[in-house]
Image: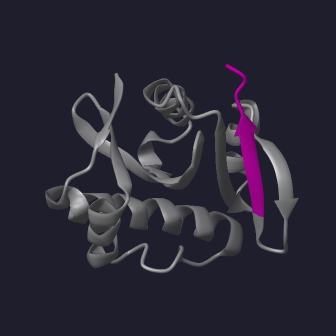
Amino acid sequence: MIEIKRAVLEEAKMITEIKTRAYNKEINTYLGRDGGPKGYNEVSSQEEIITNLIAYKIELDSKIIGAFFLIPLGEGKMRFEDFVIEPEEQNKGYGYETLVKLEALYPNVNEWCLSTPIFSIGNRHLYEKFGYQEVSRDENEIEYIKKIDR
């Protein structure tokens, strides 16, 4: 069973390792190299996220398999960032289940936003299946918003 819980500093190393594997798999699949956003493979970057933002871990049967963080954007708005799942656990429905649980955890949020690389076909499919609408794009990223009427 998937659970989402606040991440703590002691988990920064493990989350960084998962992020590194997930981003490297994604970038390698589509661009033929390793890589990710600035600091994706640095424990100090994850420690900063855990300390200063709303950081979550994703657990499957009490084992950490992923992570993400949130940035409040004002009344009823939230930005969803850095969503990663361990490569061996991808394509099993855990991403969708995580999004369901996240929305239930924040019932007062009626507008969610996020972005994903244009080349990331799997991410785009997940977000669009979950009701996110593309609002803009440039040569690298697609920006999505999901509005919830309550």
- Tell me the quarter of the image containing the C terminus: top right
Residue 144 to residue 44: above or below:
above
Give coordinates of residue 17: x percent, y percent: 31, 64
96 versus 23 height, above or below: above
Q: Quadrant of residue 132?
A: top right
The verdict on residue 149 being magenta is yes
The foreground one among 120 and 136 is 136
Where, by quadrant of the figure, is residue 116 drawn? bottom right
Which residue is more in the foreground, 105 or 14? 105
In the image, residue 22 lies at what x, y percent?
A: 47, 59
Q: Nearer the viewer, residue 20 or 88?
A: 20
Residue at 32 percent of width and 68 percent of height: 46
Segment tinted magenta in the rendering: 142-150
Principal SS element in the magenta part? strand
State which quarter of the image contains the N terminus: top left
The location of residue 145, given as percent across then percent down, is 74, 45
Q: Which of the 4 image quarters holds residue 61?
A: top left
Say whether residue 125 is visible. no
In reply to whether residue 89 is colored magenta, the answer given is: no
Q: Is residue 26 left or right of residue 120?
A: left
Q: Number of numbered discs present?
A: 0
Towards the viewer: 114 or 94: 114
Residue 78, position as x, y percentages in the image: 57, 47
| 58 up-or-down from 96: above or below | below
Q: Residue at x 70, y 66 (%)?
A: 30
Q: Residue furthest left?
A: 10
138 left or right of 23? right
